[in-house]
Image: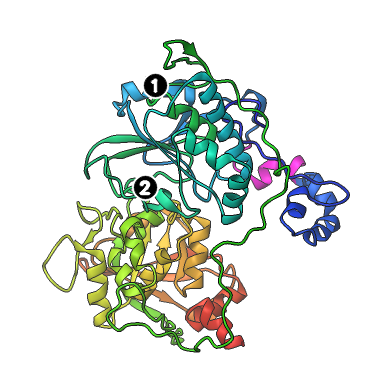
Amino acid sequence: MGAELGATTSVFPYDEKGTTYLKATNREKLTKLAHAVQKELLSSDEDVEKNPKKYFDQVLEINLSTLEPHIVGPHSPDVARPISKLAQEAQEKHYPQKVRAFLIGSCTNSSYEDLSRVVDIAKQAKVKKLKPKAALLITPGSEMIYETIKRDGFVDELEKAGAVVLANACGPCIGQWKRDDIKKGEINSIVTSYNRNFPRRNDGNPETAAFIASPEIVMAMSYGGTLSFNPLSDSLKNEDGKEVKFDPPKKAPEIPELGFSEKQVNYFPPSNDEPEEIEIHPNSERLQKLEPFKPWDGKDYKELLVLLKAKGKCTTDHISPAGPWLRYRGHLDKISDNMFMGANNAFTKDPGTGININNTEVNQPLSGIAREYKSHGLGWVVIGDENYGEGSSREHAAMSPRYLGCKAVIVRSFARIHETNLKKQGVLPLTFENSQDYDKIQVKDFISLKNLKTLAPQKEVECEIFHSDKKTRETIKLKHSLTHEQIEWFKAGSAMNYFAREK
């Protein structure tokens, strides 16, 4: 760990007295649980070792000591290459060479260890007389991390290096970044250490090419200022005109030498005379009282309309874009206006649009169509492709569809967290038993889900498709991963309803 620029391998520390990190963060009691499963923690599963193909489609062995740091993007974390290959690829694919901003931190790659390596690069740059070539923004991972790096002088070092240390929040990672150096639609490159880089994600601009690397790689690249600079091998000309190179950062401490700061900031314990009801201004656009969703009525879903047939990647950023929309995160009705704004519909040309079968208009916003269907008491479904719901764990990507009348989401496959979020909101997350059945769904089809009263774990759901244009029907099978308790969530209308009822 730390042997090379970009090395991010972490070790789960364990000894007879307890786990180092848990002890340092005042959670030593949890080590008793670790002791109880010590064997499992320190050894691999014998059956998996003997029969890996029984559990995995593909087995990859990677020698981390020979693994070159990678940089991924733009527009997807799946687009990856070793950093030594980036310069050539950027030239071939005409990515903007000049990097306009470098961003480190947020909830990912923002630990004390991460920022220790970043500060090491900053100290090297100071000695080597180098300065960042573009905006450099750094977001600590928590209030504890911020207070700790402030106490240990990291904040001072980073600010002297030309960085802006932001508050610990989602920040630019989720679009909370008001850029004034570009115009919307302007093609440009940025490099971050975030975990997502979908179009519009960081700044609302679909033409921003966002690349992701480790924190120390991002920091080192900021002194080169271009995609063609490889800090592992390339030298830079400093302010004295001399050629200098970065050394690999020193091994970062597992925990701070003085421990983590216990200073509490911005926490105000509730008073004993807090009102039971929170008063919300009737014209507020920021806050809205969240009303419980209605429980399931015990009937099968009959002739649900198809609002959207998502084509290709449909992430939570496509389903519920962030950025300026986050101002409405406390107002479900307002934020639902962005529902599926970025989704590519197989039935229309422009993202975020659909066909309202109640009228002759085409390319209407999907949220508007959903609102009209809801006003007529019509439920609807979403059809999705592979890995539907990839990305952030944001609840609104499940809450907004539920609020506007979504009854089920039927896909080829789900991203795990979003599938769970749909369950929590009372939306049925279903997958095609035969993935090719995705192709059968047409724009004016009606979907019926039958025998829901007998819904049970691992039991298939019968789905009838009525092709209204041909006046024909066909039946397909759908799978689900609902547990007994999650089925009760569905019946109650949501997990929140279920637990409130249990009390």
Q: Residues within 10 Å of mark 2 (few under 14, many from 20)?
A: many
* Numbered label attached to residue 202: 2
In the image, taking residue 152 as reference, residue 19 lies left or right, namely right
Q: Amino acid at mark 1?
A: Ser
Q: Quadrant of residue 307?
A: bottom left
Q: Is residue 429 magenta?
A: no
In the depicted structure, whether residue 123 falls above or below residue 195? above
Q: Position of residue 21 (x, y in %)?
A: 73, 50
Give the quarter of the figure containing the C terminus.
bottom right
Q: Is residue 50 magenta?
A: yes
Question: In the rendering, which numbered label is found on residue 228?
Answer: 1
Q: Position of residue 65 (x, y in %)?
A: 66, 25
125 to the left or right of 91: right
The region drawn magenta spans 48-59
Residue pictured at 22% horizontal, 76% vertical:
372
Label 1 crowd (10 A; few <14 / some 14-19 / many >=20): many
Q: Is 474 positioned to the left or the right of 21 in the image?
A: left
Please say if 7 is above or below 48. Answer: above
Residue found at x 54% / y 80%: 454
